[in-house]
């Protein structure tokens, strides 16, 4: 199955908190990778994103952390920093090496005890998990790491929502590969990127598996439940083996949001903090056009989001997953 680890030079690891559905996911590039970010949601929770602006000095990051736990979860990135420092990775500043670890969080405090959230130990454990295999392997998907407590379709209340998760996909054209790892915790529905069919999201009523289609319901006059800003969010990492600088990586991250728009409705709302990072391992200098790379980024993100909900499993009785009878049909667009 195609996934982010198809981009050589990356290691991806998840860590879960045992007492609650939350966790942290880490993309490790210890030797450094050029990176950028694009934030489209109105309520983001992030760390060290300003340094990724093309006009700013720092060129390389050593990891990117995706975390649950809302703003509390940003603490997990500190554990990633400690793990890298212990192994001699970071930006040389003279007196010491400083690992650069941007991060983004999603809100999952509604499931279980909100006092339990990813911490530095969780981030450290995700790094350990990323390095367990001697070679990169398939990325675990569903309700793991940052996707542990993800929920989609909360626009008409949590009791009518469904489980979200974290998913991964990649696209290769010629020698160019673009991959994505995305944790989907959107307020809106998740749709099939080709047919437009609603795969997961708001249901017509509590306990009923039939999808409502939140976008159509809104246009028909249905009133959404009041949703606190920042209590949703889709966050992710796009990576490519092509040598790209920060301005072009920022455009790649921006194009990745097209993948969100193809699969999530509504998206980029006042209640979401949608954030996508993009990084380059710079292993191939013969670059295709940015037009092609942008299309690949959009596709990888869209397929990663679909996989996130397809691999989800139920949480207690309030949040259901996709009925198994429909799974194979819906998965046909992302098989292989």
Image: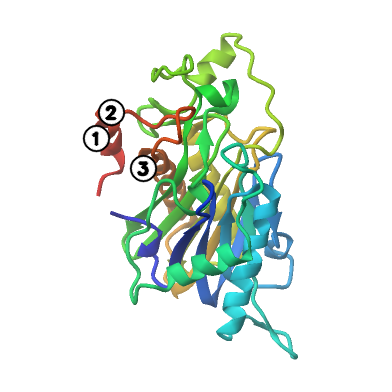
Q: Secondary structure at mark 3?
A: loop
Give the residue number, with chain letter if any, for mark 1: 328
> Do the residues under discs 1 and 2 have CB atoms within 8 angstroms?
yes
Chosen colour scheme: rainbow
Between marks 1 and 2, how big is the CA–CA gap? 6 Å
Q: Quadrant of residue 200?
A: top left
Give the percent coordinates (x, y) of residue 239: 48, 61
Q: Secondary structure at mark 2?
A: helix
Give the residue number, with chain letter if any, for mark 3: 311
Q: Nearer the viewer, residue 184 or 23?
A: 23
Q: Earlier in the sequence, mark 3 or mark 2?
A: 3
Give the residue number, with chain letter if any, for mark 2: 326
Q: Nearer the viewer, residue 23 or 212?
A: 23
**Where is 67 relative to 287, above or below?**
above
Neighbour class for label 1 at 10 Å: few (<14), some, many (≥20)?
Answer: few
Between marks 3 and 1, how big is the CA–CA gap? 11 Å
Give the percent coordinates (x, y) of residue 207: 43, 18
Q: Quadrant of residue 78?
A: bottom right
**Where is 214 relative to 59, above or below?**
above
Q: Is residue 249 left or right of residue 281?
A: right
Give the percent coordinates (x, y) of residue 276: 57, 51
Between marks 3 and 2, how big is the CA–CA gap? 12 Å
**Label for residue 320?**
none
Q: Name the residue: 58% across, 23% down.
A: 157
Give the percent coordinates (x, y) of residue 184: 51, 42
């Amino acid at each position: 199955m195609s996934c982010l680890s198809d981009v050589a030079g990356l290691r991806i690891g998840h860590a879960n908190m045992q007492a609650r559905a939350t966790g942290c996911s880490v993309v490790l590039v210890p030797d450094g990778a050029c990176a950028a970010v694009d934030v489209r949601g109105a309520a983001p929770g992030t760390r060290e994103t300003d340094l990724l602006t093309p006009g700013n000095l720092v060129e390389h990051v050593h990891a990117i952390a995706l975390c649950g736990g809302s703003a509390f979860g940003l603490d997990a990135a500190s554990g990633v920093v400690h793990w890298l420092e212990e192994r001699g990775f970071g930006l040389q500043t003279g007196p010491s090496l400083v690992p650069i670890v941007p991060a983004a969080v999603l809100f999952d405090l509604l499931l279980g005890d909100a006092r339990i959230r990813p911490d530095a130990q969780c981030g450290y454990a995700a790094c350990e998990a990323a390095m367990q295999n001697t070679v990169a392997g398939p990325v675990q998907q569903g309700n793991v790491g940052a996707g542990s407590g993800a929920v989609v379709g909360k626009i008409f209340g949590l009791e009518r929502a469904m489980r979200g998760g974290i998913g991964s996909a990649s696209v290769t054209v010629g020698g160019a590969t673009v991959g994505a790892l995305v944790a989907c915790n959107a307020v809106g529905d998740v749709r099939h990127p080709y047919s437009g069919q609603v795969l997961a999201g708001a249901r017509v009523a509590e306990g009923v598996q039939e999808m409502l289609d939140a976008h159509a319901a809104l246009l028909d006059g249905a009133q959404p439940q009041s949703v606190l800003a920042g209590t949703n969010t889709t966050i992710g990492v796009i990576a490519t083996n092509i040598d790209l600088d920060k301005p072009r990586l920022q455009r790649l991250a921006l194009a990745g949001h097209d993948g969100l728009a193809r699969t999530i409705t509504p998206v980029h709302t006042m209640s979401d903090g949608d954030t996508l990072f993009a990084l380059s391992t710079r292993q191939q200098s013969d670059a295709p056009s940015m037009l092609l790379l942008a299309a690949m980024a959009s596709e990888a993100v869209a397929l990663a989001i679909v996989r996130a909900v397809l691999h989800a499993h139920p949480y207690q009785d309030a949040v259901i997953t996709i009925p198994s009878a429909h799974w194979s049909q819906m998965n046909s667009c992302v098989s292989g």
